[in-house]
Image: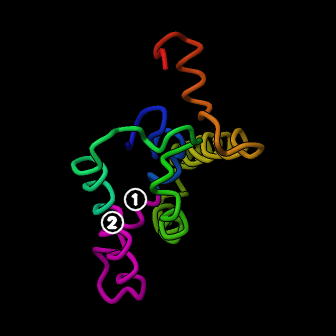
């Protein structure tokens, strides 16, 4: 669910910085976004646990350009993206990594823009390389 052809971090690695920002907000004292950080963390964990252990079938959302069960959490995750990037943007290496992650995330969005009910670009690429057969 986090990695692979429908994985959150595989298709949208920019959310790694959101995860860093979420952890920062959870540890910060007196942060006005701390309740939202707690809500985002709890909802994400709840969905992960549910779909890993209780969903029964591992269809990853069917023919969809991502893990569709988590799409509705994206605005909540984006709230913590700036906190994940702040303080590190002076590093050339982190800036380059952030740009690469943003590029991969943008490719994911634009690949599926004409028809979101299609396989992800990563799924198609893995299929073309004969690494998967479904």
Which SS class for mark 1? helix
On the image, the x and y values in percent for residue 81 come to 51, 64
Q: 123 and 12: which one is in front?
A: 123
**Res 23 quadrant in image:** bottom left
On the image, the x and y values in percent for residue 114 come to 78, 43
**Res 42 quadrant in image:** bottom left
On the image, the x and y values in percent for residue 95 come to 57, 49
Residue tagged by mark 2? 23
Residue tagged by mark 1? 19
Q: Is residue 34 left or right of residue 101?
A: left
State if disc 1 and disc 2 touch (CB < 8 Å).
Answer: yes
Residue 33 in magenta stretch: yes
For the point 54% across and 57% down, the residue is 90
On the image, the x and y values in percent for residue 121 come to 62, 31
Q: Which residues are magenta?
A: 18-44
Q: Is residue 108 above or below residue 127?
A: below
Which SS class for mark 2? helix
For the point 41% across and 38% down, the residue is 59
């Amino acid at each position: 669910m986090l990695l692979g052809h429908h994985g959150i971090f595989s298709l949208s690695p920019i959310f790694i910085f959101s995860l860093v920002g979420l952890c920062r907000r959870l540890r910060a004292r007196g942060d006005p976004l701390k309740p939202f950080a707690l809500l985002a963390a709890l909802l994400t964990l709840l969905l992960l646990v549910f779909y890993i252990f209780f969903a029964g079938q591992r269809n990853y959302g069917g023919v969809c350009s991502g893990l569709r069960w988590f799409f509705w959490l994206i605005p909540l995750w984006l709230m913590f993206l700036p906190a994940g990037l702040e303080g590190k943007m002076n590093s050339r290496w982190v800036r380059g990594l952030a740009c690469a992650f943003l590029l991969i995330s943008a490719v994911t969005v634009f690949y599926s823009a004409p028809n979101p009910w299609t396989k992800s670009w990563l799924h198609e690429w893995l299929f073309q390389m004969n690494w998967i057969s479904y």
